Amino acid sequence: MVWAPRNLLGSPAGGLALALALGLGGCYSGASAGDDDGASVSDATGSASASASASASGGSSADSEGDDETTGGPPAIPFQPGPPTFPRLTESQYRNSVQDLLGGALPTPPLEPDTNPYLFFTIGAASTTVSEIGVQQYEEAADAITRAVFSDAGRREALVGCVPATADDACATAFIAGFGRRAMRRPLSADEQARWGAVAVALADGDPWEGLRMAVAGMLQSPHFLYRVELGEADPGDPTRRRYTGWEMASRLSYLLWNTTPDDQLLAAAEAGLLDTDEGLRAEAERLLEDPRARTTIQAFFAQFLDLGRLAGVERDPNSYPLYTPNLAEAMRAEVELLVDDLVHRQGGDIRQIFTTRRTFVNSDLAAIYGIEAEGATPITFVPVELPEDGPRAGLLTFGAFLTMNAHATETSPTLRGRYVRERVLCEMVPAPPGDVDTNIPEPDGEAHTLRERLEQHRADPACANCHAFIDPPGFLFEHFDSIGAFRELDNGYPIDASGDLDGAPLAGARDLAKALEDDPRVSRCMVTQLYRHATGRLDQAQEYPGLKAIDQEFAEGGYRFHDLLLALVTSEAFRTAATPEDL
């Protein structure tokens, strides 16, 4: 048992920091959306906050921000930063960071599972507390990981860089300073240096290597490692806000773009003051984006934004769906990942095309679902294809992943599909149904044969009408696609009506929706908003809307390239400042 580091966390200084970090939970109380066709809104969208939904959807905050005396509207709202957060490292960030700090193959002991309220694991990490079992798991992980490293003479010498004669000689002292700087993502204070040096001495038990191991194990349990303590420093020009320091910006950059701790070059840039300038931030961000780790991190963002994790639970009866194969859900996810990689990295084009493009990547299973030729495709080989110009598909909303995730095991769901469009693509708030409403959809009868007709019956209930009138019309546009995304002409033996609308504009089907989304300003605005929430670990607030609008404008000026969006975000005032907490 690594009892000494836990004891240190119970000391006045360590305990206060841990109490601060662990006491930050409860900021949000949302949960993921349900699957019922009658249930509607998802707290997972972040739309439960009125100010957040307004800024995300172009509602009241957006409208008022653009008004001024010349238009007769209210005065423009100036940008004000939102509150700082103290996000705990997610499981992947913890494992990546430990790997980068210690190198080589490491044990992967269990950790408390991440949560993703409002879509993103970063928000869960900033808004949930660690259980007692979770704290114990951190202790056990630190013990197992450090034992794996320090029990190997070659690895420990490579890590430390010298051979300590005692736990407090020059070798040991220099290692603690260097490792502490990397682990805490800033230089250790004199008190911290003395504290961790004392741990090494007290627990060496005659073996300086064991003393250093215990110091490292303690640092891996420190709140300053497990949490990103980003308070900023007073802004001389504005007492209401704080500006993140260069060290804090190094962490913010690295965890956003690499999902791991800053490397030595980024820490050196922080120390040199380069991250205090637009030019320095942009240069380092561009360097990080050129690294393969950025591709992985960008994929992780889109997987959460698009909710691809739900594909893991998809099951279909192969007797009802002959084209369904055991690996089909995995192929659907791979298709989206390949498209994201193509648009972001290979093409470097307008990322909004993800909802409109006819270019995609299929294996033989997906080609069969889509009814297209794909020369060279096999169950494990994906090939690029151009979907037919006169076909029913264009964009991610006609791909298997979206259509299958947002359907039931035996039938489609216009409600789930329409809700996804509203919440995920447009960042609009869908009101929750009354608590006593019956959300069950009527079974087929002599009057209502198709699912559309049954939903029309359901909408006749006044308690259901408003919500379904908002989400069902765009959802009906996908009715030609069954529960695994295959095209069909009939539902329950009756012709399908796939007409619908978006905000009153009539549309004939999913291809029409793709065309409508092509230049809809809500699409880019929503992407900016969701990236901002992911990057900051919290929901946006109304006073931040001008900052998000400025990022969106820069995004547009760059041709809606996702790399340009990331650069606009990291150099923005919205990302570099925070409101001054009342207790500071």
Image: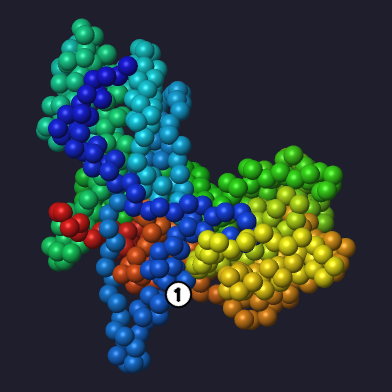
Taking depth in this image into account, of 451 and 249 the one nearest to the observer is 451
Residue at horizontal 19 percent and vertical 11 percent from the top? 165
Which corner quadrant holds the C terminus? bottom left
Q: Secondary structure at mark 1?
A: loop
Q: Residue furthest right?
A: 493
In the displayed structure, would residue 583 be above or below residue 262? below
Q: Which amino acid type is shown beneath numbered disc 1?
A: Gly
Which corner quadrant holds the N terminus? top left
Please state the horizontal and vertical placement of residue 284, each as a whole percent of the image.
Answer: 34, 51
Q: Residue furthest top?
A: 206
Please state the horizontal and vertical placement of residue 551, each as a whole percent of the image.
Answer: 39, 67
Residue at horizontal 46 percent and vertical 48 percent from the top? 116
Residue at horizontal 67 percent and vertical 59 percent from the top? 440
Q: Residues within 10 Å of mark 1 (few under 14, many from 20)?
A: many
Residue at horizontal 41 percent and vertical 57 percent from the top? 533
Q: In terms of image quadrants, where is residue 485? A: bottom right
Can residue 402 be seen in the rendering of this structure?
Answer: no
Please state the horizontal and vertical placement of residue 52, each as a whole percent of the image.
Answer: 40, 66
In the displayed structure image, the side of residue 44 where residue 361 appears, left or right: right
Instruction: Name the colouring of the figure.
Output: rainbow
In the displayed structure image, the side of residue 434 where residue 268 appears, left or right: left
- How many numbered callouts? 1
Taking depth in this image into account, of 451 and 364 the one nearest to the observer is 451
Q: Which residue is mark 1?
A: 58
In the displayed structure, would residue 414 be above or below residue 333? below
Q: In terms of image quadrants, where is residue 568? A: bottom left
